[in-house]
């Protein structure tokens, strides 16, 4: 009996590993396949032909990668500009209806996104924001703000109040205290929220589709177009490109974010 | 008070509807070391935080060198606090923490470095300036916190239970070091503590707070030997309480506990609050002399009791003695046995006498 005690655990771990790595393996195969058609279980011809196609200077892929990164960076800037003051206020000031305010940031996520974005697109159309980078950035920022604000509030709440009082006490004004004590100590959390917003923006599809198309093409939109057209190789390669920052973020969170900050997210 | 470094004038503070400070007034001389002593919730920390500007005063004034500062933000008060948690900035080195206040005052790099070096040397932290504070021991952090406060040469040094996170062994040394440093620098210091011995050893003057009010202000010797109320007597360690009957006899009083004791004659003015026919006497366990229950009085009040309990905390024996229905804790160097009849001899100068009723409330609480 005891000899086989490891078996259930091994089966569960195996299934989890398959669920995670199965699709990734499929992705990797498609990225390296030049020809792969039914009924073959594995690609017929391997090669990096499509990588050249994606990375050649005139390709749509590189242009849309550039667009994606620009949009993501702008989204981070807009989100942080709002999340840092909002997070500090939510963490430090005794606001009435604090819970309600926190929840309000979640509101854009609470409704079916397609319905929301169709109406956003309609409004943006009248404002001339449709098909512009600014329009897409706004949509992404609203989407990313909930995480940015929640994580920033948690990061500020984790900074010991006495550390700020000590700075005030020794002669630093409120702004000085914030810039030299509070912000540096909350920085890992703020950076985490920035990365999170960046990734959310990089991955975002629905909003970009309704607000950006046809003038703004981001990487996820390109991937969508490619897979609809049957270009699985192009889609797989784009997906792999999108995977890189996500994995990097996981490593950052694991390395730099302390448990006491994570525990306060949404609290 | 003219020439006071710090004057607190009828200061009140409240958290919501709860009044934490009730018209507290106090004047501190330049260079004086004052301890705010009291149990938790007595308002001592609130008073310190009101002085530092972290807690707004509801009414009253706080004056530094005659200037009203009650409306100023904390950073404009020229004070420096050593926090109970030390509150050192973990993203800075020891030198960075100590030099922060100097940088704020616009000191250039070379002058700041020199001053920080002086502080490190004075606090025996040589060579540790480059360490992150997270890599320092508790005692070293405590010194860095003190150095950060002293570096800016504040008008008033505030100490918020700075020793409570230290090991008992180190604490004894640090008490004397801080006191010596304060003496040397001649700085005015306000020290908050709940530790009676710490306050006695460090302070020039002790302010005992009870429920947001000052119960007594005096030198360590005064508050110890001449407590102004039953509360102060109990708080300062005279925790044994016995009710005595009092009978006028000419210009004196005759005190006794009926069947349980002999009678002694005391001057009428030795009873605080004027004598009625009941007197409450507080005494310390270490101020008594145990003897035979019927030992001659020779100016001592002798309570007749029985040893109910014995322990040896070191140096002397500690006995629980039952007198009638009351229980007293007393110390004596001799070995006695549980069940032995014994007399608790109380010399007149060991008794703190208060008129019963006038101030009996706090006594019951202890």
Image (cartoon, rainbow, N blue to C red):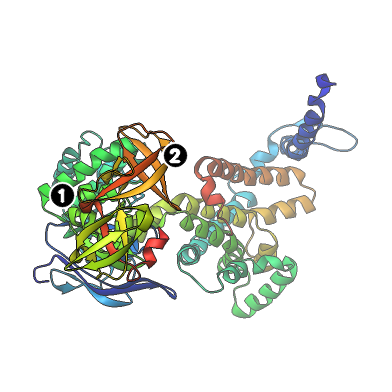
> Is residue B219 shown above or below B322?
below
Name the residue furthest bottom.
A126
Quarter of the rendering occupied by the C terminus of chain B? bottom left
How many circles with numbers are drawn on the protein? 2
Q: Residue at x 52, y 55 (%)?
A: A194
**C-alpha distance separating marks 2 and 1:** 44 Å
Dot 2 alpha-carbon crowd within 10 angstroms: few under 14, some 14 to 19, many 20 or more: some
**Left or right: B211 as drawn, with respect to B109:** right
**Near-viewer residue (A35 or B252):** B252
Instruction: Work out whether residue B165 can be spotted.
Output: no
Vertical relation: A224 (above or below) B310 = below
Quadrant assignment, res B227 = bottom left
Q: In which quarter of the image is residue A43?
A: top right
Of residues B136 and A110, the one drawn nearer to the viewer in this rendering = B136
Q: In which quarter of the image is the N terminus of chain B?
A: bottom left
Q: Are the residues flagged by discs 2 and 1 from a single subunit? A: yes
**Residue labelled with disc 2:** B309
Residue A33: horizontal and vertical position, in percent? 75, 35
What subunit carries mark 1?
B
Instruction: Tell me where residue B281 appears, x and y as whole percent.
Output: 31, 58
Between B203 and A242, the one nearer to me in the picture: B203
Q: Nearer the viewer, mark 2 or mark 1?
A: 2
Q: Name the residue under label 1.
A: B182
**Label 2 residue SS:** strand
On residue A30, which mark appears?
none
The residue drawn where x is 45% and y is 68% is: A93
Q: Nearer the viewer, residue B226 or B21?
A: B226
Q: Which residue is drawn at 57% across and 53% down?
A: A196
């Amino acid at each position: 009996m005891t000899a086989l005690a490891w078996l259930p655990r091994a089966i569960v771990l195996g299934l989890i590993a398959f669920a995670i790595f199965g699709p990734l393996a499929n992705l990797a195969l498609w990225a390296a396949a030049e020809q792969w058609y039914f009924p073959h279980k594995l690609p017929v011809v391997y090669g990096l032909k499509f990588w050249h196609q994606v990375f050649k200077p005139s390709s749509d892929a590189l242009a849309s990668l550039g667009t994606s990164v620009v949009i993501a960076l702008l989204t981070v800037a807009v989100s942080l500009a709002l999340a840092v003051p909002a997070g500090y206020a939510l963490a430090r000031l005794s606001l009435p209806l604090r819970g309600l305010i926190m929840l309000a940031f979640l509101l854009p996520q609470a409704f079916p996104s397609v319905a929301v974005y169709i109406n956003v697109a309609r409004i943006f159309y009248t404002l001339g924001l449709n098909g512009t980078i600014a329009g897409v950035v706004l949509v992404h920022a609203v989407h990313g703000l909930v995480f940015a604000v929640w994580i920033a509030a948690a990061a500020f709440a984790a900074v010991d109040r006495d550390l700020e009082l000590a700075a005030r006490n020794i002669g630093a004004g409120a702004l000085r205290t914030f810039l030299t004590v509070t912000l540096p100590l909350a920085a890992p959390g703020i950076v985490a929220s920035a990365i999170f917003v960046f990734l959310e923006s990089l991955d975002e599809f629905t909003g970009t589709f309704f607000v950006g198309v046809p003038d703004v093409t981001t990487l996820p939109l390109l991937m969508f177009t490619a897979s609809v057209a049957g270009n699985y190789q192009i889609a797989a390669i784009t997906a792999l490109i999108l995977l890189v920052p996500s994995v990097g973020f996981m490593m950052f969170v694991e390395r730099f974010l302390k448990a006491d900050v994570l525990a306060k997210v949404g609290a | 008070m003219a020439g006071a470094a710090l004057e607190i004038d009828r200061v009140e503070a409240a958290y919501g509807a709860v009044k934490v400070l009730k018209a507290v007034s106090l004047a501190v001389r330049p260079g004086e070391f004052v301890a705010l002593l009291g149990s938790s919730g007595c308002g001592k920390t609130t008073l310190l935080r009101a002085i530092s500007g972290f807690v707004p005063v509801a009414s009253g004034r706080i004056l530094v060198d005659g200037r009203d500062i009650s409306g100023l933000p904390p950073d404009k008060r020229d004070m420096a606090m050593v926090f109970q948690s030390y509150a050192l900035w973990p993203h800075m080195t020891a030198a960075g923490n100590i030099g922060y206040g100097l940088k704020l005052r616009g000191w250039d790099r070379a002058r700041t470095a020199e001053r920080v070096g002086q502080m490190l040397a004075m606090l025996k932290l040589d060579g540790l300036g480059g360490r992150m504070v997270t890599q320092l021991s508790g005692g070293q952090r405590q010194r860095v916190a003190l150095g950060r406060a002293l570096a800016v040469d504040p008008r008033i040094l505030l100490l918020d239970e700075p020793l409570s996170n230290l090991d008992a062994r180190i604490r004894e040394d640090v008490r004397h070091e801080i006191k010596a440093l304060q003496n040397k620098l001649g700085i005015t210091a306000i020290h908050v503590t709940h530790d009676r011995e710490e306050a006695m050893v460090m302070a020039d003057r002790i302010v005992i707070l009870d429920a947001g009010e000052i119960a007594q202000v005096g030198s360590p010797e005064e508050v110890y030997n001449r407590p102004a109320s039953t509360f102060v007597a109990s708080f300062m360690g005279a925790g044994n309480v016995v009710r005595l009957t009092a009978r006028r006899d000419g210009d004196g009083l005759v005190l006794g506990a009926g069947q349980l004791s002999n009678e002694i004659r005391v001057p009428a003015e030795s009873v605080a609050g004027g004598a009625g026919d009941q007197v409450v006497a507080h005494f310390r366990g270490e101020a008594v002399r145990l003897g035979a229950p019927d030992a001659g009085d020779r100016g001592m009040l002798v309570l007749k009791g029985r040893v109910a309990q014995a322990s040896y905390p070191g140096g002397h024996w500690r006995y629980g003695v039952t007198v009638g229905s009351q229980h007293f804790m007393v110390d004596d160097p001799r070995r006695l046995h549980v069940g032995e009849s014994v007399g608790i001899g109380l010399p007149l100068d060991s008794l703190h006498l208060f008129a019963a009723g006038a101030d009996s409330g706090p006594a019951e609480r202890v």
